[in-house]
Amino acid sequence: MDERRNIPATDQLLDDPPVAAAIERFGRERVKRTVLAAQHRARNGEIAAADVIDEVRANLPRESGGLRRTINATGVLLHTNLGRARLSEAAVRALHESAGTCDVELDPETGQRGRRAASVRRSLLEAVPAAADAHVVNNGAAALSLAATALAAGGEIVLARGEMVEIGDGFRIPELLESTGARLREVGTTNRVNIDDYRAAVGPDTGLVLKVHPSNFVISGFTSTVEVGQLAELDAPVVVDIGSGLLTAHENLPDEPDANSVLTAGADLVTASGDKLLGGPQAGLLLGDERITAALRAHPMARALRVDKLTLAALYATLNGPATPTARALRRDRAESERRAEAIAEKLSAAGVPAAAEASSATVGGGGAPGVTLPSAAVALPEHYARTLRGADPPVLSRVEHGRCLVDLFALDPADDAELTTAILAAGSPCPDPGGGGRG
Ligand SMILES: *Cc1c(COP(=O)(O)O)cnc(C)c1O
């Protein structure tokens, strides 16, 4: 009972400066709901009366649509927890332009209904000359589902045991495939598969032969896989899930498959994500044979996986605009990153923060280039800074390594350095509590 009497009054909570600021933007009614909910939780004993004000502040509506902008200083370029690829400036402008009403499905000549996504399709075909056609869905998993459903439901998907991949957060490609009503026909062993294994498995029930890029692990030692060129000789459509979405070969990622090379090697269809190495919005790309893409488009499921105008606009801008932040990062050279880290460390040191620049190794993350490290540089701080920086505004996500907090510059452009420095300085004195930003 005593505890309940300590719950702050509604008027007192509404006068709290951050709460009052939220009222100006979102209105009193909306903010009051947050206040009442926090008081309710305290009355139920779910939170302490003393924590009500923090609960209210944490749950105030936000201008950014409920998501908080976060600085990715983890050294993981495509961090799934941080929204993977950062959109290009051109893509952000395109989102803004298309947010209202736009001609997403209108033929300007006739004023009648036009083909949806025609300009994105054209751009993809220009970027991937080996593709006869292209179709876009909501994400990589949707692309795979649509291909499996349209080509193999009721039949079999032939897949090597070494390519039965779990992507992350419990998402397992074999389970997704089976959920479409297709049966999996596993071939080979964990470490080895050969073309005869495939030959023996392919038959009248085969809907497709699938090759999946092991995008987050490597198997080394006594191994063998079958190249796309050999699979193409089988009497079944060959679908390759390249995952990471490189459209053409990238010199800094020589082992990463790309759509154009895989199609040139003989694949009938390639599936890929839009928000990994392509550096665009979340999307699933299907590139390849025209008869197959026509079957995909005609399938009723295509409508359920259809992308919205915002995705189409951002994807078009990604494909046609200047280098994306992802592309710029992949070409970053260590000497330049080290100069940036030194300049930041100097400013921090001058303000009494124990910071030092050092060389660092970044990774692609987000299901791409497993085992590959990319040259980077970081500002090293005492480990307990990791937690302090997560509380900065905007939050800075770092990486804890060997008992230190590394603020890695790989995923950041030089233009971000000033904001990063300001956020670190404003984060205030660190609270000595371990726990880092982590990898992955
Ligand atoms: C990431 C990935 C997927 C899933 O793509 P989403 O866009 O996350 O749905 C599927 N296959 C592979 C090989 C991947 O790397």
Image (cartoon, rainbow, N blue to C red):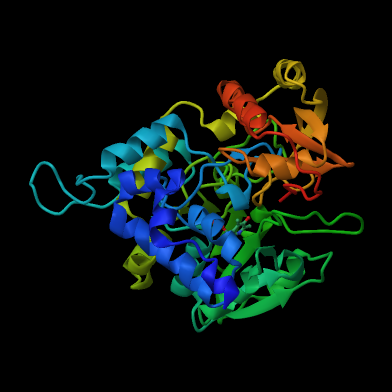
Q: Is residue 335 above or below residue 117?
A: above
Q: Quadrant of residue 394?
A: top right
The spot of residue 433 in percent (x, y) is: 80, 48
The spot of residue 279 in percent (x, y) is: 53, 40
Q: Quadrant of residue 47?
A: bottom right
| Residue at the spot 70% in from the left edge and 37% down from the top edge | 253
Q: Nearer the viewer, residue 355 or 311?
A: 355
Q: Quadrant of residue 298?
A: bottom left
Any part of residue 35 in sight: yes
Q: Nearer the viewer, residue 247 or 357?
A: 357
Q: Is residue 205 above or below residue 424?
A: below
The spot of residue 15 in percent (x, y) is: 40, 49
The quadrant in which the N terminus is found is bottom right
In what quadrant does ligand 1 lie? bottom right
| Residue at the spot 31% in from the left edge and 44% down from the top edge | 24
Q: Nearer the viewer, residue 237 or 417?
A: 417
Q: Is residue 4 above or below residue 378?
A: below
Q: How many marks?
A: 0
- Drawn side of residue 63 relative to residue 238, left or right: left
In this view, the residue farthest toward the left is 110
| Residue at the spot 57% in from the left edge and 65% down from the top edge | 49
The spot of residue 294 in percent (x, y) is: 35, 62
Any part of residue 122 in sight: no
